[in-house]
Amino acid sequence: MKLIFEKSIPGRGQDIFPACDVPVVLPKEDKLRKTTVHLPEISENEMGRHYTALAKRAHGVNDGFYPLGSCTMKHNPRINEKMANLPGFAKLHPLQPAHTVEGANELIADLEKFLCEITGMAGVTFQPAAGAHGEFTGLLLIKAYHHDRGDADRTEILVPDAAHGTNPASATMAGYKTVVIKSNENGTVDLDDLKAHLGPKTAGLMLTNPNTVGLFDPNIMEITRLVHEAGGLCYYDGANLNAVIGIVRPADIGFDVIHMNLHKTFSTPHGGGGPGSGPCAFKDFLAPFAPGLVCKDGEYVRAEKSIGNMTGFYGNFLVMVKAYTYLLTIGKDVHTIAENAVLNANYMQEKLKDIYPIAFDTTCMHEFVIGLDPIYRKTHVSALDVAKALLDYGIHPPTIYFPLIVHEALMIEPTETETKETLDEAIKAFREIYDRIFNAPESVQLAPQTTPVLRLDDTKAAREPHLRYEF
Amino acid sequence: MGTFIPNTKEEQLQMLNEIGYKDFDDLFKVIPDEAKVKGELNLPEGLSEIEVDRKVQALANKNVIFRSIFRGAGAYNHYVPSAVDAIANKEEFLTAYTPYQAEISQGILQSIFEYQTMIAEITGMDIANASMYDGASAAAEACWMCKDRRHSTIYVSGAIDERILRVINTYSFGRESKVVVIPAKNGVTDAEALKAALADDPAASCFLMQYPNFYGVVEDAEELCKITKEAGAKFIMYVQPLSLGVLKTPGEIGADIAVGEGQPLGLGLEFGGPYLGFLSTRQENMRQIPGRLIGETVDTRGDRGFVLTIQAREQHIRREKASSNICSNEAWCALRAGIYLSTIGPKGFEQVATLCSSKAHYMAAELDKIGMKLAYDGEFWNEFVTTCPDADKLNAALEAKGILGGLKICDGNVLWCCTELNSKEDIDEVVAIAKEVF
Amino acid sequence: MVDPKELKYTKDHEWLRYEGDFAYVGISDFAQSELGDLVFVNLPEVDDEVVAGEAFGDVESVKAVSDVLSPVTGVVVEINEELLDDASLINSDPYGAWFIKVGSITETDELLDSDEYDKFIEEA
């Protein structure tokens, strides 16, 4: 398919702007641009067709099943979008006087209350624009807390080996050294290894629970107790909150600070990779360090020892509107989200485990991991091949090669918004692929065959980077 | 009562039984009892769609929508062409995630590749990434890109928006790098102070300026660039992207990195977000770029296709040694920017920048006539600072007429902003009201 | 051409070749085939110190990054700039594609000769 630049014809274009109704005045000549700018010159009709063609070459939740582990690709309700597009929200300038944005600030305050109730925390900052940004924020809160107590020697953040890559990367951004904690044979935190690494240098522990292999850590109370005894704080990576929303509150099991992904658990669309929103909730002793301005009684105020700002204004407000709309809809039944997310995952796991090796074969939470390694060793059909084969069934593949502790991993998260029929169809596809692995392995290795492009050369892309069109 | 769970209670029970569980309690017995919520959460009853619609609309209606806006300061009231909403709201774009599986994500990947090209083009740089959270966080990441083993101090102009500075400072609290603010003098960076500071610091890594700066002044960027580079540091420009329809680009000036707030490119005011951070740079800095990069390649048939590339920089592979932790970015906002720039084209890009500049100069001249003088004598584009006898009083009078006036800044002066949406009549009305008030 | 039989190896799959007081370091054929197509290499700078058993750089494939450890303690006197432009040389000619040349060597890791290394790979 052509790039939009290749459809451009000089002189074509669209008339958007009116003639100037005041004298034309520009800054002085030496301040002005001399180089030409190459932008498309294209009619509205041709441009519309271009993007429609691109849309047809994309796959969203609305196009089909999307069991991308760790990403919670649930249905994005239409009402959320409608509410976020209301001019009463979308047309507000962030620096309008507080008395002209009372509705917006009331919404933020209400959403904070909801999220506090769901997490058990005392306050929420909406500054972070995404999950990783929320992690960074949470770690800065931990850092500010220790520094404020005069305990700046705590320089280490403990992170399990199964953690999302963002955890160690966030720790580095917060100026911490990452100390990796091993998983035990059950796929959860190895308590002895944890104890061995806790000490006066421990600033905190970052934990996803359920973890990235989809297991709820049965020792969670013990884990958070041990970290607190060592003087550290406990950070909850809320990427997997969908598994336990309404059933477990992170604050009740010993966590001090958490980020949530509004674009995962709270149904706001992922938009092809963002915008998300990663609000960070915290216990009251961390409140003095919270970032950003908050509207209290008609005045914008900043926390007394605030770490500063994570984004320029108040975070991704319109995403908050969507999450708020979602929570108004679901209300106190939020636990049904977790129940059905966990049911759907276990249903698929149970129906596949006779043929596919499950990494940790026990009741999973909202996702489970197939470790294809034994099959790969026999057949040379890899997790990547299975993923690509699924494309020909119209299914978005699971997350692959993650978590790192499982070889040839396929991480499957169906979410609660899928029907039994969809799950059954996916199960049938997985089982057919399994047959093909043994009967016609090359057909799996050559998949996909029905997509707009076939397998792409990642090596060439990285060795000879072309990151833009050359005019 | 609202729900998006399709399976009925009966179906749920049937599925539970089919896989060997009595009920949901049985399914959740893997969670220790002591960890579970006791009783019900204190949340309201769920609502039907009509009830939700009514409740949220009521909140929206409590806010004031100004019919005429003369406030910028980081969020700009530009026109969003109809095509932008119509196209971006296609659900294939809206409900997809990061294009990890390239074969069924070519639409997303190509749209970002086109966006990367457009950002490189408007800033005059070689390459751009797939987007950052917002302008301020893009600035903070750009500063970090310049750090190496011998260079770590971040220098920032005192004439930048304090919101940008605050985010840079917050990121630096994490990364433990020193941030030095070069004071502003007469609304521009004090070049002599910059020269002196850099001369004394072999560890200087970069200098960041805003262009036009917070006060709207188009500073002598070439001079600042020369000073910075002579000291062996990298030069970062924080730019208003639409200004580059007429103003000299970071590429022409010699910047190493250009960043900025992409909100003017087809995004609404949105009460501050989601916005769009953009980042472009020279080819040689490619491996220091944070976040996603889309690259061109071929498939097994030799057909062109696009993939996420040079991923070994990123957190999911390099973990604690990654260039940044960013993964989700603002892809959908970048899509909007791509559609916006395709809609307006090269002609519209120059036209909108010209309109902004002309209206601002007209307004400044009209305000001058009633005694509200320009506070600084530097060249400006679409924002400028004037003196004002009583900014609060003026803004209250404007608000009563549905007009959002300029922003009162610390010294009692007012920072005004004009865009293509401010007609001559709107401007004349503001001046008339100001005349009445004082 | 370098004869792999003449080289010394570490259990982390680096090779070492002495030339007078200097040593060249690279990664073995086995290592490059396990890592797959390499797309980039990060090297230290000249005059950097390297420490036996510690990482001095890394190699990137499309989906992974792996540290490369130094078999010796010393000072980098030269780096192979060619690899910075074309990491595929490591795949096509692993024993020609040296990463760094080290001088002022004060300490050397326990090394295997070629036969011992082949045996080590087989056992692993």
Image (spheres, rainbow, N blue to C red):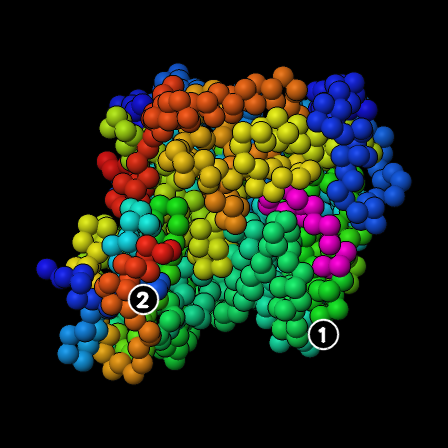
The x and y percentages for residue B425 are: 55, 32
Q: Is residue A187 left or right of residue B176?
A: right
Q: Nearer the viewer, residue B408 or B295?
A: B295
Quarter of the image with the N terminus of chain C in it: bottom left
Residue B431 in view: no
Q: What kind of element bears circle 1?
A: loop
Question: Residue shown at 44%/51% (left/top)?
Answer: B317
Query: To which residue does mark 1 refer?
Result: A149
Q: Main secondary structure of the magenta part?
A: loop
Total marks placed? 2
Q: Is residue B307 visible?
A: yes
Magenta residue check for A210: yes
Query: What residue lies at 59% left-to-right and 45% top-to-bottom?
Result: A212
| Magenta region | A209-224
Give residue A202's quadrant in the image: bottom right
Please give the chain letter of the residue carrying mark 2: C
- Crowd class of label 1 (few under 14; some 14 to 19; many from 20; radius 10 Å): few
